[in-house]
Image (tube, rainbow, N blue to C red):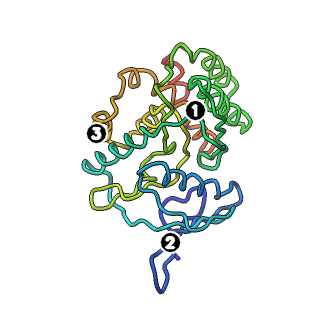
Amino acid sequence: MRPLAGGKISHVLRVDFVRGEPLVAKVGDGSHDLRIEAYMLRYLRRHSALPIPDVIHAEPDLLLMDYIAGEEPLEQASLRHLGQLLAACHQVCGASYGLERDTLIGPLHQPNPPRDSWVEFFRDQRLLYMTGVARESGELPSALDDRLLRFAASLGDWLIEPGYPALIHGDMWRTNIIVRDGRVAGIIDPALYYAHNEMELAYMALFDGLGDEFFRAYHELLPIDSQFWESRRHIYNLYPLLVHLIIFGQKYIQPLENSLARFGF
């Protein structure tokens, strides 16, 4: 066994055998149930064409899955491939926003009660819910808490109801993408549900980890509204910024304040 990159929340190991293919073992610390991650991986394998590793075994503190080789950087060809893969995934349509069960984002609970209205779902189950978790964690200053609550009450002025609930990976950033031979060979660590597809795109633009080639390839298959770039991405990124505030601390307060200030809050 030897450690693999990542593993900020769980220990991740490559397990080699005398015979047969290697596996990946994810070993938990008791803070969350790895069977939820197994459910999400299996769901994406069944409902999308994303290259998701096969889950071999799952229990609360142990997840075994196929090992997917690949340590290349994301470059032009693989970014285009990623754009094509996600555009196809986002064309998988759900009956409602949310999911059939709650999931996780990182170690944090992610509620997914099915809703017909995206604006209501995002307000109640993403922005207000994670604001409450941040409040309870002690990381959220009271003045910023108040600004978030006031902004949440006005979301109907800024957001739209999408055409349909799209299946999203939910935690799509560089370390969750495995690249080999200029192609995306694997995608791991989902936080999935059915959402406005722009939730995924906003997160991918947040830390500038993915190049313009991804967005060009995606736009060719699923056009991206100009209002996404001008306003909605900043709204949708309040959710991952709150998640990062809870997990990693107060360096994420300023980005939250900057995003709210764009809208006069």
Q: Amino acid at mark 2?
A: Leu
Residue at (25, 50) in percent of width and height: 77
Give whichever of 209, 155 is nearer the camera.
Answer: 155
- Of mark 2 and mark 1, the one earlier in the sequence is 2
Regarding mark 2 in the picture, which secondary structure is present there? strand
Crowding at dot 3, Cα within 10 Å, few <14 / some 14-19 / many 20+, comes out as: many
Residue 206: percent from the left, percent from the top? 44, 36
Q: Are marks 3 and 1 in contact (CB under 8 Å)?
A: no
Q: Are marks 3 and 2 in contact (CB under 8 Å)?
A: no
Q: Which residue is mark 3?
A: 217
* Residue 144 placement, left or right of 87: right
Residue at (47, 61) in percent of width and height: 53
Q: Amino acid at mark 1?
A: Ser
Residue 31: percent from the left, percent from the top? 70, 55
Dividing the picture into quadrants, the one containing residue 140 is top right
Regarding mark 1 in the picture, which secondary structure is present there? loop
Regarding mark 3 in the picture, which secondary structure is present there? helix
Give residue 96's mark. Answer: 1
Give residue 23's mark. Answer: 2
Residue at (67, 44) in percent of width and height: 109
Distance of mark 3 from mark 2, alpha carbons? 32 Å
